[in-house]
Image (cartoon, rainbow, N blue to C red):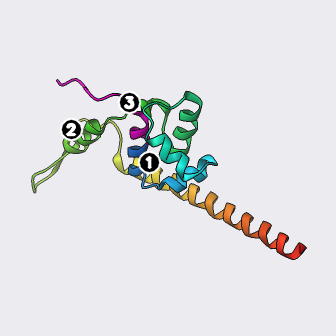
Amino acid sequence: MSTQTRPNHIGRKISRIRELRDMKQEALAYALGTSQQTISTIENSETVDDSKLAEIAKALGVTVEAIKNFSEEAVLNIIGNTYNVDNSSAVNYGCTFNPLDKLIQAHEEQIKLYERLVQAEKEKVEYLEKIIKGK
């Protein structure tokens, strides 16, 4: 059993979870009401204050603990050890959740985020139209 020698780089963990969610920095920034540059700064930071981390976790659809405990190696081990395909069957090695359920859940959360983005764009257009008509 190896010990982790790298520091617990929270920003890098946020970045990887966001990428696994197939979410761009801009989408996360929008969900948090901030800029893409701010997200970039956060993802390059080794530490993130707890209140900001809670907001980010909510936007990513995970818990704060999931971010803090995220391990690239663990994800790869789960992927590598969950299924063993030998042309006759797929063998499940103790996976405690249905990956398809998690995928569907992530997809539904993404749809909700996109719906919020579209609604915000509609509201922005309506606001701009009001300004133009007001001139």
The range drawn in magenta is 1-14
**Label 3 packing within 10 angstroms: few (<14), some (14-19), many (20+):** few
Q: Which element carries disc 3, helix, strand or loop? A: helix
Q: Which mark is residue 76?
A: none
Relative placement, left or right, of 10 versus 84 is: right
Circle 2: residue type: Tyr
Relative placement, left or right, of 124 versus 107 is: right
Q: Nearer the viewer, residue 45 or 85?
A: 45
Q: Nearer the viewer, mark 2 or mark 3?
A: 3
**Mark 3 = which residue?**
69
**Mark 2 = which residue?**
93
Residue 129: percent from left, percent from top: 80, 73
Chief secondary structure of the magenta portion: loop
Per the model, the C-alpha gap separating discs 1 and 2 is: 27 Å
**Label 1 packing within 10 angstroms: few (<14), some (14-19), many (20+):** many
**Mark 1 = which residue?**
18
Residue 39: percent from left, percent from top: 52, 46
Residue 43: percent from left, percent from top: 45, 42
Per the model, the C-alpha gap separating discs 1 and 3 is: 15 Å
Relative placement, left or right, of 76 versus 22 is: left
Image position of 85 with respect to 45: above or below: below
Q: Determine whether label 1 and label 3 are within 8 Å by CB.
A: no
Circle 1: residue type: Arg
Per the model, the C-alpha gap separating discs 2 and 3 is: 21 Å
Mark 1 or mark 2, which has the lower sequence index?
A: 1
